[in-house]
Image (tube, rainbow, N blue to C red):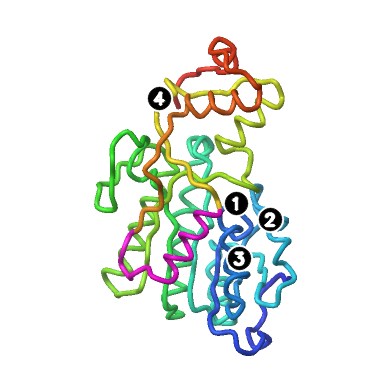
């Protein structure tokens, strides 16, 4: 592993693509990097991450010594750094995961969310465009459609974001799409459902509920709990991103999800049943705490 920007000339011979993954020490991106490094030994996978509170290089320990993996610590919001990175690393493809993603925090830190998610995406996009990369994949979220899975939606559905996080991702999408519409720059947008699995930061709903129950604390449910969500396992999502990298068409948007949705209340009940080893409705209800919606 290495920190800082260093020339690409030292890359092993025979490596055909150089893929930049931003936010690569985060939950989902780390799974994608591991899959890329292991399945494509002829690709160089460059992990760019500023190592914020929810990032961990431990997520990548299985590939950290591979010759086709490289770590660079840096911030997508720094224009000069990003310009130098693209010049020295000779990037072919960008997978842009780096973002602030905690919905609750977005209500209290709107400026920071817009700075990272919108401005940071613009800086990265501009650097990638000037470097003439062959594909730019922007990782968005299905939350741009709204706050519930009660209604079916597809890629052409209108964007109706309901929280500052989703609004920042929707705004960044506009920048990305504008580069396709104006310059025919080969961008692809993905919108994925909620993801769960190993290495997930405990602020997200599934690890959060599990952690609370293990501490003999109640699951905190906002509002009625009837709002539905799709959940995807991390390795399945990683496979989907590899498919988008290979087959995604410029200018297109791809939803990544399932046809199965579960309410937050039902999710809590299932976890209580498993962790507290009970089927008693009264006891299950005891472990749920309903609070005012955000």
Task: Identify the secondary structure beneath mark 1.
Answer: helix
Q: Earlier in the sequence, mark 1 or mark 3?
A: 1
How many residues crowd mark 4 within 10 Å: few (<14), some (14–19), many (20+)? some
C-beta proximity under 8 Å, tags 1 and 2: yes
Disc 1 from disc 2: Cα separation: 8 Å
C-beta proximity under 8 Å, tags 2 and 3: no
Residue 11 position in % (x across, y down): 66, 84
Residue 67 position in % (x across, y down): 70, 77
Residue tagged 2: 59
Judge by depth and name the residue closer to the eye, 237 or 192: 237
Residue 213 position in % (x across, y down): 66, 25
Q: Is residue 164 above or below residue 243?
A: above
Task: Identify the secondary structure beneath mark 4.
Answer: loop
Residue tagged 1: 27
Magenta-colored span: 235-253
Residue tagged 4: 226
Q: Earlier in the sequence, mark 4 or mark 1?
A: 1
How many residues crowd mark 2 within 10 Å: few (<14), some (14–19), many (20+)? many
Q: Is residue 157 above or below residue 187?
A: above
- Answer whether residue 267 is magenta in the image: no
Q: Quadrant of the N terminus?
A: bottom right
- Answer whether residue 242 is magenta in the image: yes
The kind of secondary structure the magenta stretch mainly shows is helix
87 to the left or right of 257? right
C-beta proximity under 8 Å, tags 3 and 4: no
């Amino acid at each position: 592993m290495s920190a800082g920007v260093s020339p690409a000339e030292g890359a092993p011979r025979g490596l055909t693509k150089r893929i930049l993954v931003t936010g690569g020490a985060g939950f989902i991106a780390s799974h994608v990097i591991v899959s890329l490094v292991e399945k494509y030994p002829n690709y160089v996978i460059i992990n760019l991450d500023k190592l914020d509170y929810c990032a961990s290089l431990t997520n990548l320990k299985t590939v950290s010594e591979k010759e086709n993996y490289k770590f660079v610590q840096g911030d997508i919001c720094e224009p000069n750094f990003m310009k130098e990175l693209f010049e020295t690393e000779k990037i072919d493809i960008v997978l842009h995961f780096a973002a602030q993603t905690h919905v609750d925090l977005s209500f209290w830190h709107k400026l920071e969310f817009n700075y990272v998610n919108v401005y940071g995406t613009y800086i990265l996009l501009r650097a990638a465009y000037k470097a003439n990369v062959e594909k730019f994949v922007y990782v968005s979220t299905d939350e741009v459609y709204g706050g519930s899975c009660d209604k079916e939606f597809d890629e052409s559905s209108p964007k109706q974001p309901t929280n500052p996080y989703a609004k920042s991702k929707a705004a960044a999408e506009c920048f990305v799409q504008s580069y396709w519409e104006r310059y025919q720059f080969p961008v692809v947008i993905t919108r994925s459902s909620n993801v769960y699995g190993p290495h997930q930061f405990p602020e997200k709903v599934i690890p959060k509920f599990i952690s609370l129950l293990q501490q003999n604390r109640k699951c905190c449910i906002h509002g009625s709990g009837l709002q539905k969500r799709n959940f995807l396992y991390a390795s399945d999502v990683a496979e989907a991103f590899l498919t988008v990298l290979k087959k995604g068409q410029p200018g297109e948007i791809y939803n990544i999800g399932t046809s199965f949705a579960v309410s937050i209340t039902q999710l809590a009940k299932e976890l209580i049943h498993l962790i507290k080893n009970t089927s008693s409705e009264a006891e299950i209800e005891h472990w749920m705490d309903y609070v005012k919606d955000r």
